[in-house]
Image (cartoon, rainbow, N blue to C red):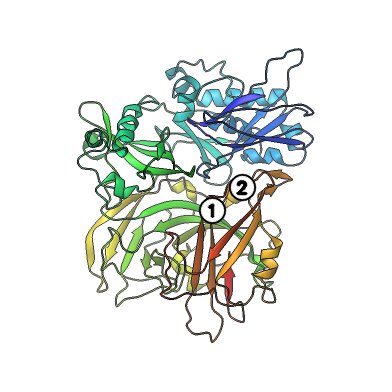
């Protein structure tokens, strides 16, 4: 079998697992062009193909091959893309493509007739986008049609859409032209209004990326072509200072992905884009920016025009408690990750920040932390009735606002956030159908007297809003039993204070190595009763982890090292001992 793994741009080094109807699996890796080949010897159709992005930027992709032709030596084509993931999701009741990896699901849900019907539904949803790229909507096969990831034809169609979480669980497909008008992906889907076609061709940024590459290589004249004279991004006025990772020597830029087209100030056509890159050491990642169409019709990079360094994105987490008193409240949580670093372009006298917008009850406030090992402001633990003054700090480690939570399977308790945590929890789970894609939030800075600093800043959530219900469709990693017993249990071998801790986990789900790669690990440790100082200590390890065929991974986390790699402790510190009144979080 052969195929291409792509989300518009090819995914190089994708970790590919092919699972057959009996649960047998084989693995391979895509090449630099996103292409792969693999033997199907001994496998029984239907087949589920799962591809994981080695950068962790994109969620797992899926594809289904309903049958293996006989009497031919030609390879079976099994592309794995955004479009094939949509087809796989349309086969399920949950809207989660990885449901097909469960025991017996593939054989019962992925028969030829069902797959054909799912493809027809997808083509109806794409009936505006397919012909705009020279493809007939009535006959397109996203799984079995060979293509090249070159921003034309089928690849241009892939560029135009994303598969993202739906407001109440499952997934939906959206267009970059009108991302808030999504179409749910599940067995019950009926398409009434097709997705809108983007206002520009898939390759509209090819010239910008060419001159940006020249700019970063040292050709200053190219910089004026790639980056607008009025560029500003998170308070930085040069592309290199705003994006040091992508601007480092020897970095290779990939094909950008457009997340959203929108109309900017003065009616100018703009777009939020994600630019992938690979360092000389092989580490891959992405950077977000905003591009605009100039008066002459060309495009350049304008940046998000924010005066301060603030980033807002959606998050989803799974909380599993080992304490018997809390285990009944094990749950999925989701909400907003609000990152406001201390220092950099942010004011030296920044003492608090407020955040308002869709999905937020009232006003959130972030203030400096009392703990070590984290370089961002934290949400207040209690609801504030006004702007904090007098140098208020937060003992929480939270810069994540929780707007949705749902009990894990088997958890018997109904969680109600206590008063001392209401500063970073909604009063009750939010109806996320009221939160649009790429919502804008208003962030305002204040000094210690409560006086406003500068102008309020509009910050776009660059990721889809996520409900806690989406947790049921995620292939979660499993923390090793040894870590749970030794470090997270009061009687464990590592319960005493530790300067660094080795963590280990597994990516095996339903017997298959399909969980996404971990990008970072964190330890949060609060000291016990009577311990001085009463200072929370954090530590981070920044990945991503490299793919391991065994599905087993490790990292080492040092106390006091923050998410930016900076040692926050003035002297060497340790993670406090796990004793009465203490807590540890991995």
Point out residue 571 in the picture as x, y percentages from the top left corner: 43, 76
| Helix, strand or loop at mark 1 | strand
How many marks overall? 2
**Vertical side of 570 occupied by 172: above or below:** above
In the rendered image, residue 289, in percent from the top left (x then y), is placed at 34, 42
Above or below, 560 relative to 292: below
Badge number at residue 11: none
The numbered mark at residue 316 is: 1
Front position in the image: 189 or 331: 331
Q: What residue is disc 2 on?
A: 474
Q: Residue at x 64, y 41 (%)?
A: 94
User: x%, y% of residue 486?
Assistant: 68, 70
Q: Are marks 2 and 1 in contact (CB under 8 Å)?
A: yes
How many C-alpha atoms fall within 10 Å of the one at disc 1: few (<14), some, or many (≥20)? Answer: many
User: Which class describes the residues within 10 Å of circle 2: few (<14), some (14-19), or many (20+)?
Assistant: many
> Mark 1 or mark 2, which is nearer the start of the sequence?
1
Q: Residue at x 52, y 52 (%)?
A: 543
* Residue projecting furthest to the bottom: 530
Work out whether residue 437 can be spotted.
no
Instruction: Mark yes or no: residue 301 visible.
Output: yes
Give the CA distance from mark 2 to mark 1: 10 Å
Q: Nearer the viewer, residue 530 or 168?
A: 530
Q: Residue at x 57, y 23 (%)?
A: 142
Coordinates of residue 250 in the picture (x, y in percent): 39, 40
């Amino acid at each position: 079998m052969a195929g291409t793994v792509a989300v518009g741009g090819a995914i190089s080094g994708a970790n590919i697992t092919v699972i057959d109807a009996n649960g047998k699996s084989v693995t391979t890796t895509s090449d630099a062009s996103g292409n792969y080949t693999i033997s199907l010897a001994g496998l029984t159709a239907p087949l589920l193909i799962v591809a994981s992005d080695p950068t962790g930027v994109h969620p797992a992709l899926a594809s289904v091959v309903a049958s293996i032709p006989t009497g031919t030596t030609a390879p079976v084509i099994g592309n794995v893309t955004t479009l094939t993931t949509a087809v796989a999701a349309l086969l399920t009741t949950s809207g989660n493509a990885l449901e097909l990896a469960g025991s017996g699901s593939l054989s019962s849900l992925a028969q030829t007739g069902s797959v054909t019907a799912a493809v027809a539904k997808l083509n109806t949803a794409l009936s505006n986008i397919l012909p705009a790229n020279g493809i007939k909507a009535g006959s397109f096969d996203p799984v079995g049609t060979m293509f090249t990831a070159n921003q034309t034809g089928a690849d241009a169609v892939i560029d135009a859409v994303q598969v993202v979480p739906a407001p109440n669980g499952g997934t939906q497909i959206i267009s970059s032209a009108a991302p808030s008008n999504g179409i749910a992906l599940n067995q019950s889907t009926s398409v009434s209004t097709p997705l809108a076609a983007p206002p520009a061709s898939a390759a509209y940024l090819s010239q910008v990326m060419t001159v940006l590459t020249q700019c970063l290589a040292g050709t200053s004249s190219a910089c004026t072509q790639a980056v607008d004279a009025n560029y500003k991004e998170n308070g930085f006025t040069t592309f290199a200072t705003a994006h040091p990772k992508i601007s480092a020597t020897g970095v290779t830029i990939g094909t950008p992905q457009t997340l959203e087209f929108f109309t900017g100030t003065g009616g100018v056509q703009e777009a939020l884009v994600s630019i992938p890159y690979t360092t000389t050491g092989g580490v891959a990642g992405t950077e977000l920016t905003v591009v605009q169409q100039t008066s002459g019709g060309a495009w350049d990079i304008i940046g998000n025009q924010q005066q301060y360094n603030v980033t807002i994105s959606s998050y989803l987490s799974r909380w599993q408690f080992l304490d018997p008193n809390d285990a009944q409240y094990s749950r999925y949580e989701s909400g907003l990750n609000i990152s406001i670093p201390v220092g950099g372009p942010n004011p030296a006298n920044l003492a608090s920040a407020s955040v308002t917008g869709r999905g937020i009850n009232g006003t959130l406030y972030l203030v400096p932390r009392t703990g070590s090992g984290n370089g961002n402001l934290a949400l207040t633990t209690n609801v504030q009735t006004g702007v904090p003054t007098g140098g208020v700090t937060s003992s929480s480690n939270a810069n994540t606002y929780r707007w949705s939570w749902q009990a894990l399977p088997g958890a018997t308790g109904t969680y109600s956030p206590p008063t001392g945590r209401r500063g970073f929890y909604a009063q009750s789970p939010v109806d996320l159908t009221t939160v649009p894609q790429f919502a804008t939030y208003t962030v305002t800075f204040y000094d210690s007297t409560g006086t406003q600093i500068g102008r309020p800043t509009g910050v776009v959530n660059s990721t889809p809003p996520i409900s806690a219900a989406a947790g049921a469709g995620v292939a979660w990693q499993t923390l090793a039993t040894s870590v749970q017993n030794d470090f997270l249990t009061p009687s464990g071998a590592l319960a005493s204070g530790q300067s660094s801790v080795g963590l280990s986990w597994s990516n095996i789900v339903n017997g298959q190595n399909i969980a996404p790669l971990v990008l970072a690990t964190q330890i949060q440790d609060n000291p016990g009763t009577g311990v001085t100082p009463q200072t929370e200590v954090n530590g981070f390890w920044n990945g991503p982890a490299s793919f391991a065929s065994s599905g087993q991974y490790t990292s080492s986390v040092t106390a006091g090292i923050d998410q930016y790699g900076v040692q926050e402790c003035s002297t060497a510190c340790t993670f406090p001992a796990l004793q009465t009144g203490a807590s540890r979080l991995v």
